[in-house]
Image (cartoon, helix red, strand yellow):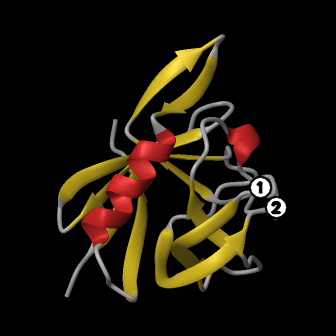
Amino acid sequence: MHSATIIRYYAKDATPGIFLWNDNAIAATLELPWKENKTKISCIPEGLYRCERVRNRITTGGTQINSTYLISEVKGRSGILFHVGNSVKDSNGCVLIGNNYAIVEGRQMILNSRVGFFEWLKTIGQIEKFNIKIVSASI
């Protein structure tokens, strides 16, 4: 069975993390800051969730996604996808995927998101479902 984990830390304006697949770091992640799990303005709480492959989705920002994963079983939330994006402005509660980070004009950013997202999808392969554990980094 494949295992996925996001190890993240909470910053003032964003929640950056590292996506592990079978204990190997394969992508950088970026989420909204923690705001009590409020829809469209908060990252999701730490916990164990189910991810399921979905196709032909459109983000609330209007981006077409041919294939990605939906995170389910988040209490009080729905429609949480993994997708391309460079800053929290590109997310309404979803998890952005990229290759690395930078601080641009004082803001946490994710870099090479489009390339990183497709590399992430390729690494996961054709898995239809998996569980993901989201935890805080011990700093």
Q: Residue at x 75, y 58 (%)?
A: 36
- For label 1, the SS is loop
Looking at the image, is mark 2 or mark 1 earlier in the sequence?
Answer: 2
Identify residue type, mark 2.
Thr
- For label 2, the SS is loop
Residue extending farthest top = 105
Q: Which residue is mark 1?
A: 92
Residue 86 is left or right of residue 52, and the answer is right
Relative height, residue 18 to residue 46 (above, below): above
Label 2 vs label 1: CA separation?
7 Å
Q: Residue 60, which numbered label?
A: 2
Q: Residue at x 72, y 76 (%)?
A: 79
Residue 31 seen in render = yes
- Around disc 1, counting alpha carbons within 10 Å, would you say few (fewer than 14), some (14 to 19), or many (20 or more)? many
Residue 93 image-quadrant placement? bottom right
Q: Residue 106, which numbered label?
A: none
Image position, residue 60 (x, y; %): 82, 61
Residue 64 is left or right of residue 114, and the answer is right
Tell me the quadrant of the picture where the N terminus can be found.
bottom left
Relative height, residue 139 to residue 71 (above, below): above
Disc 2 + disc 1, Cβ < 8 Å:
yes
Q: Nearer the viewer, residue 129 or 63?
A: 63
Residue 114 is left or right of residue 121, and the answer is right
Identify residue type, mark 1.
Asn
Tell me the quadrant of the picture where the C terminus can be found.
top left
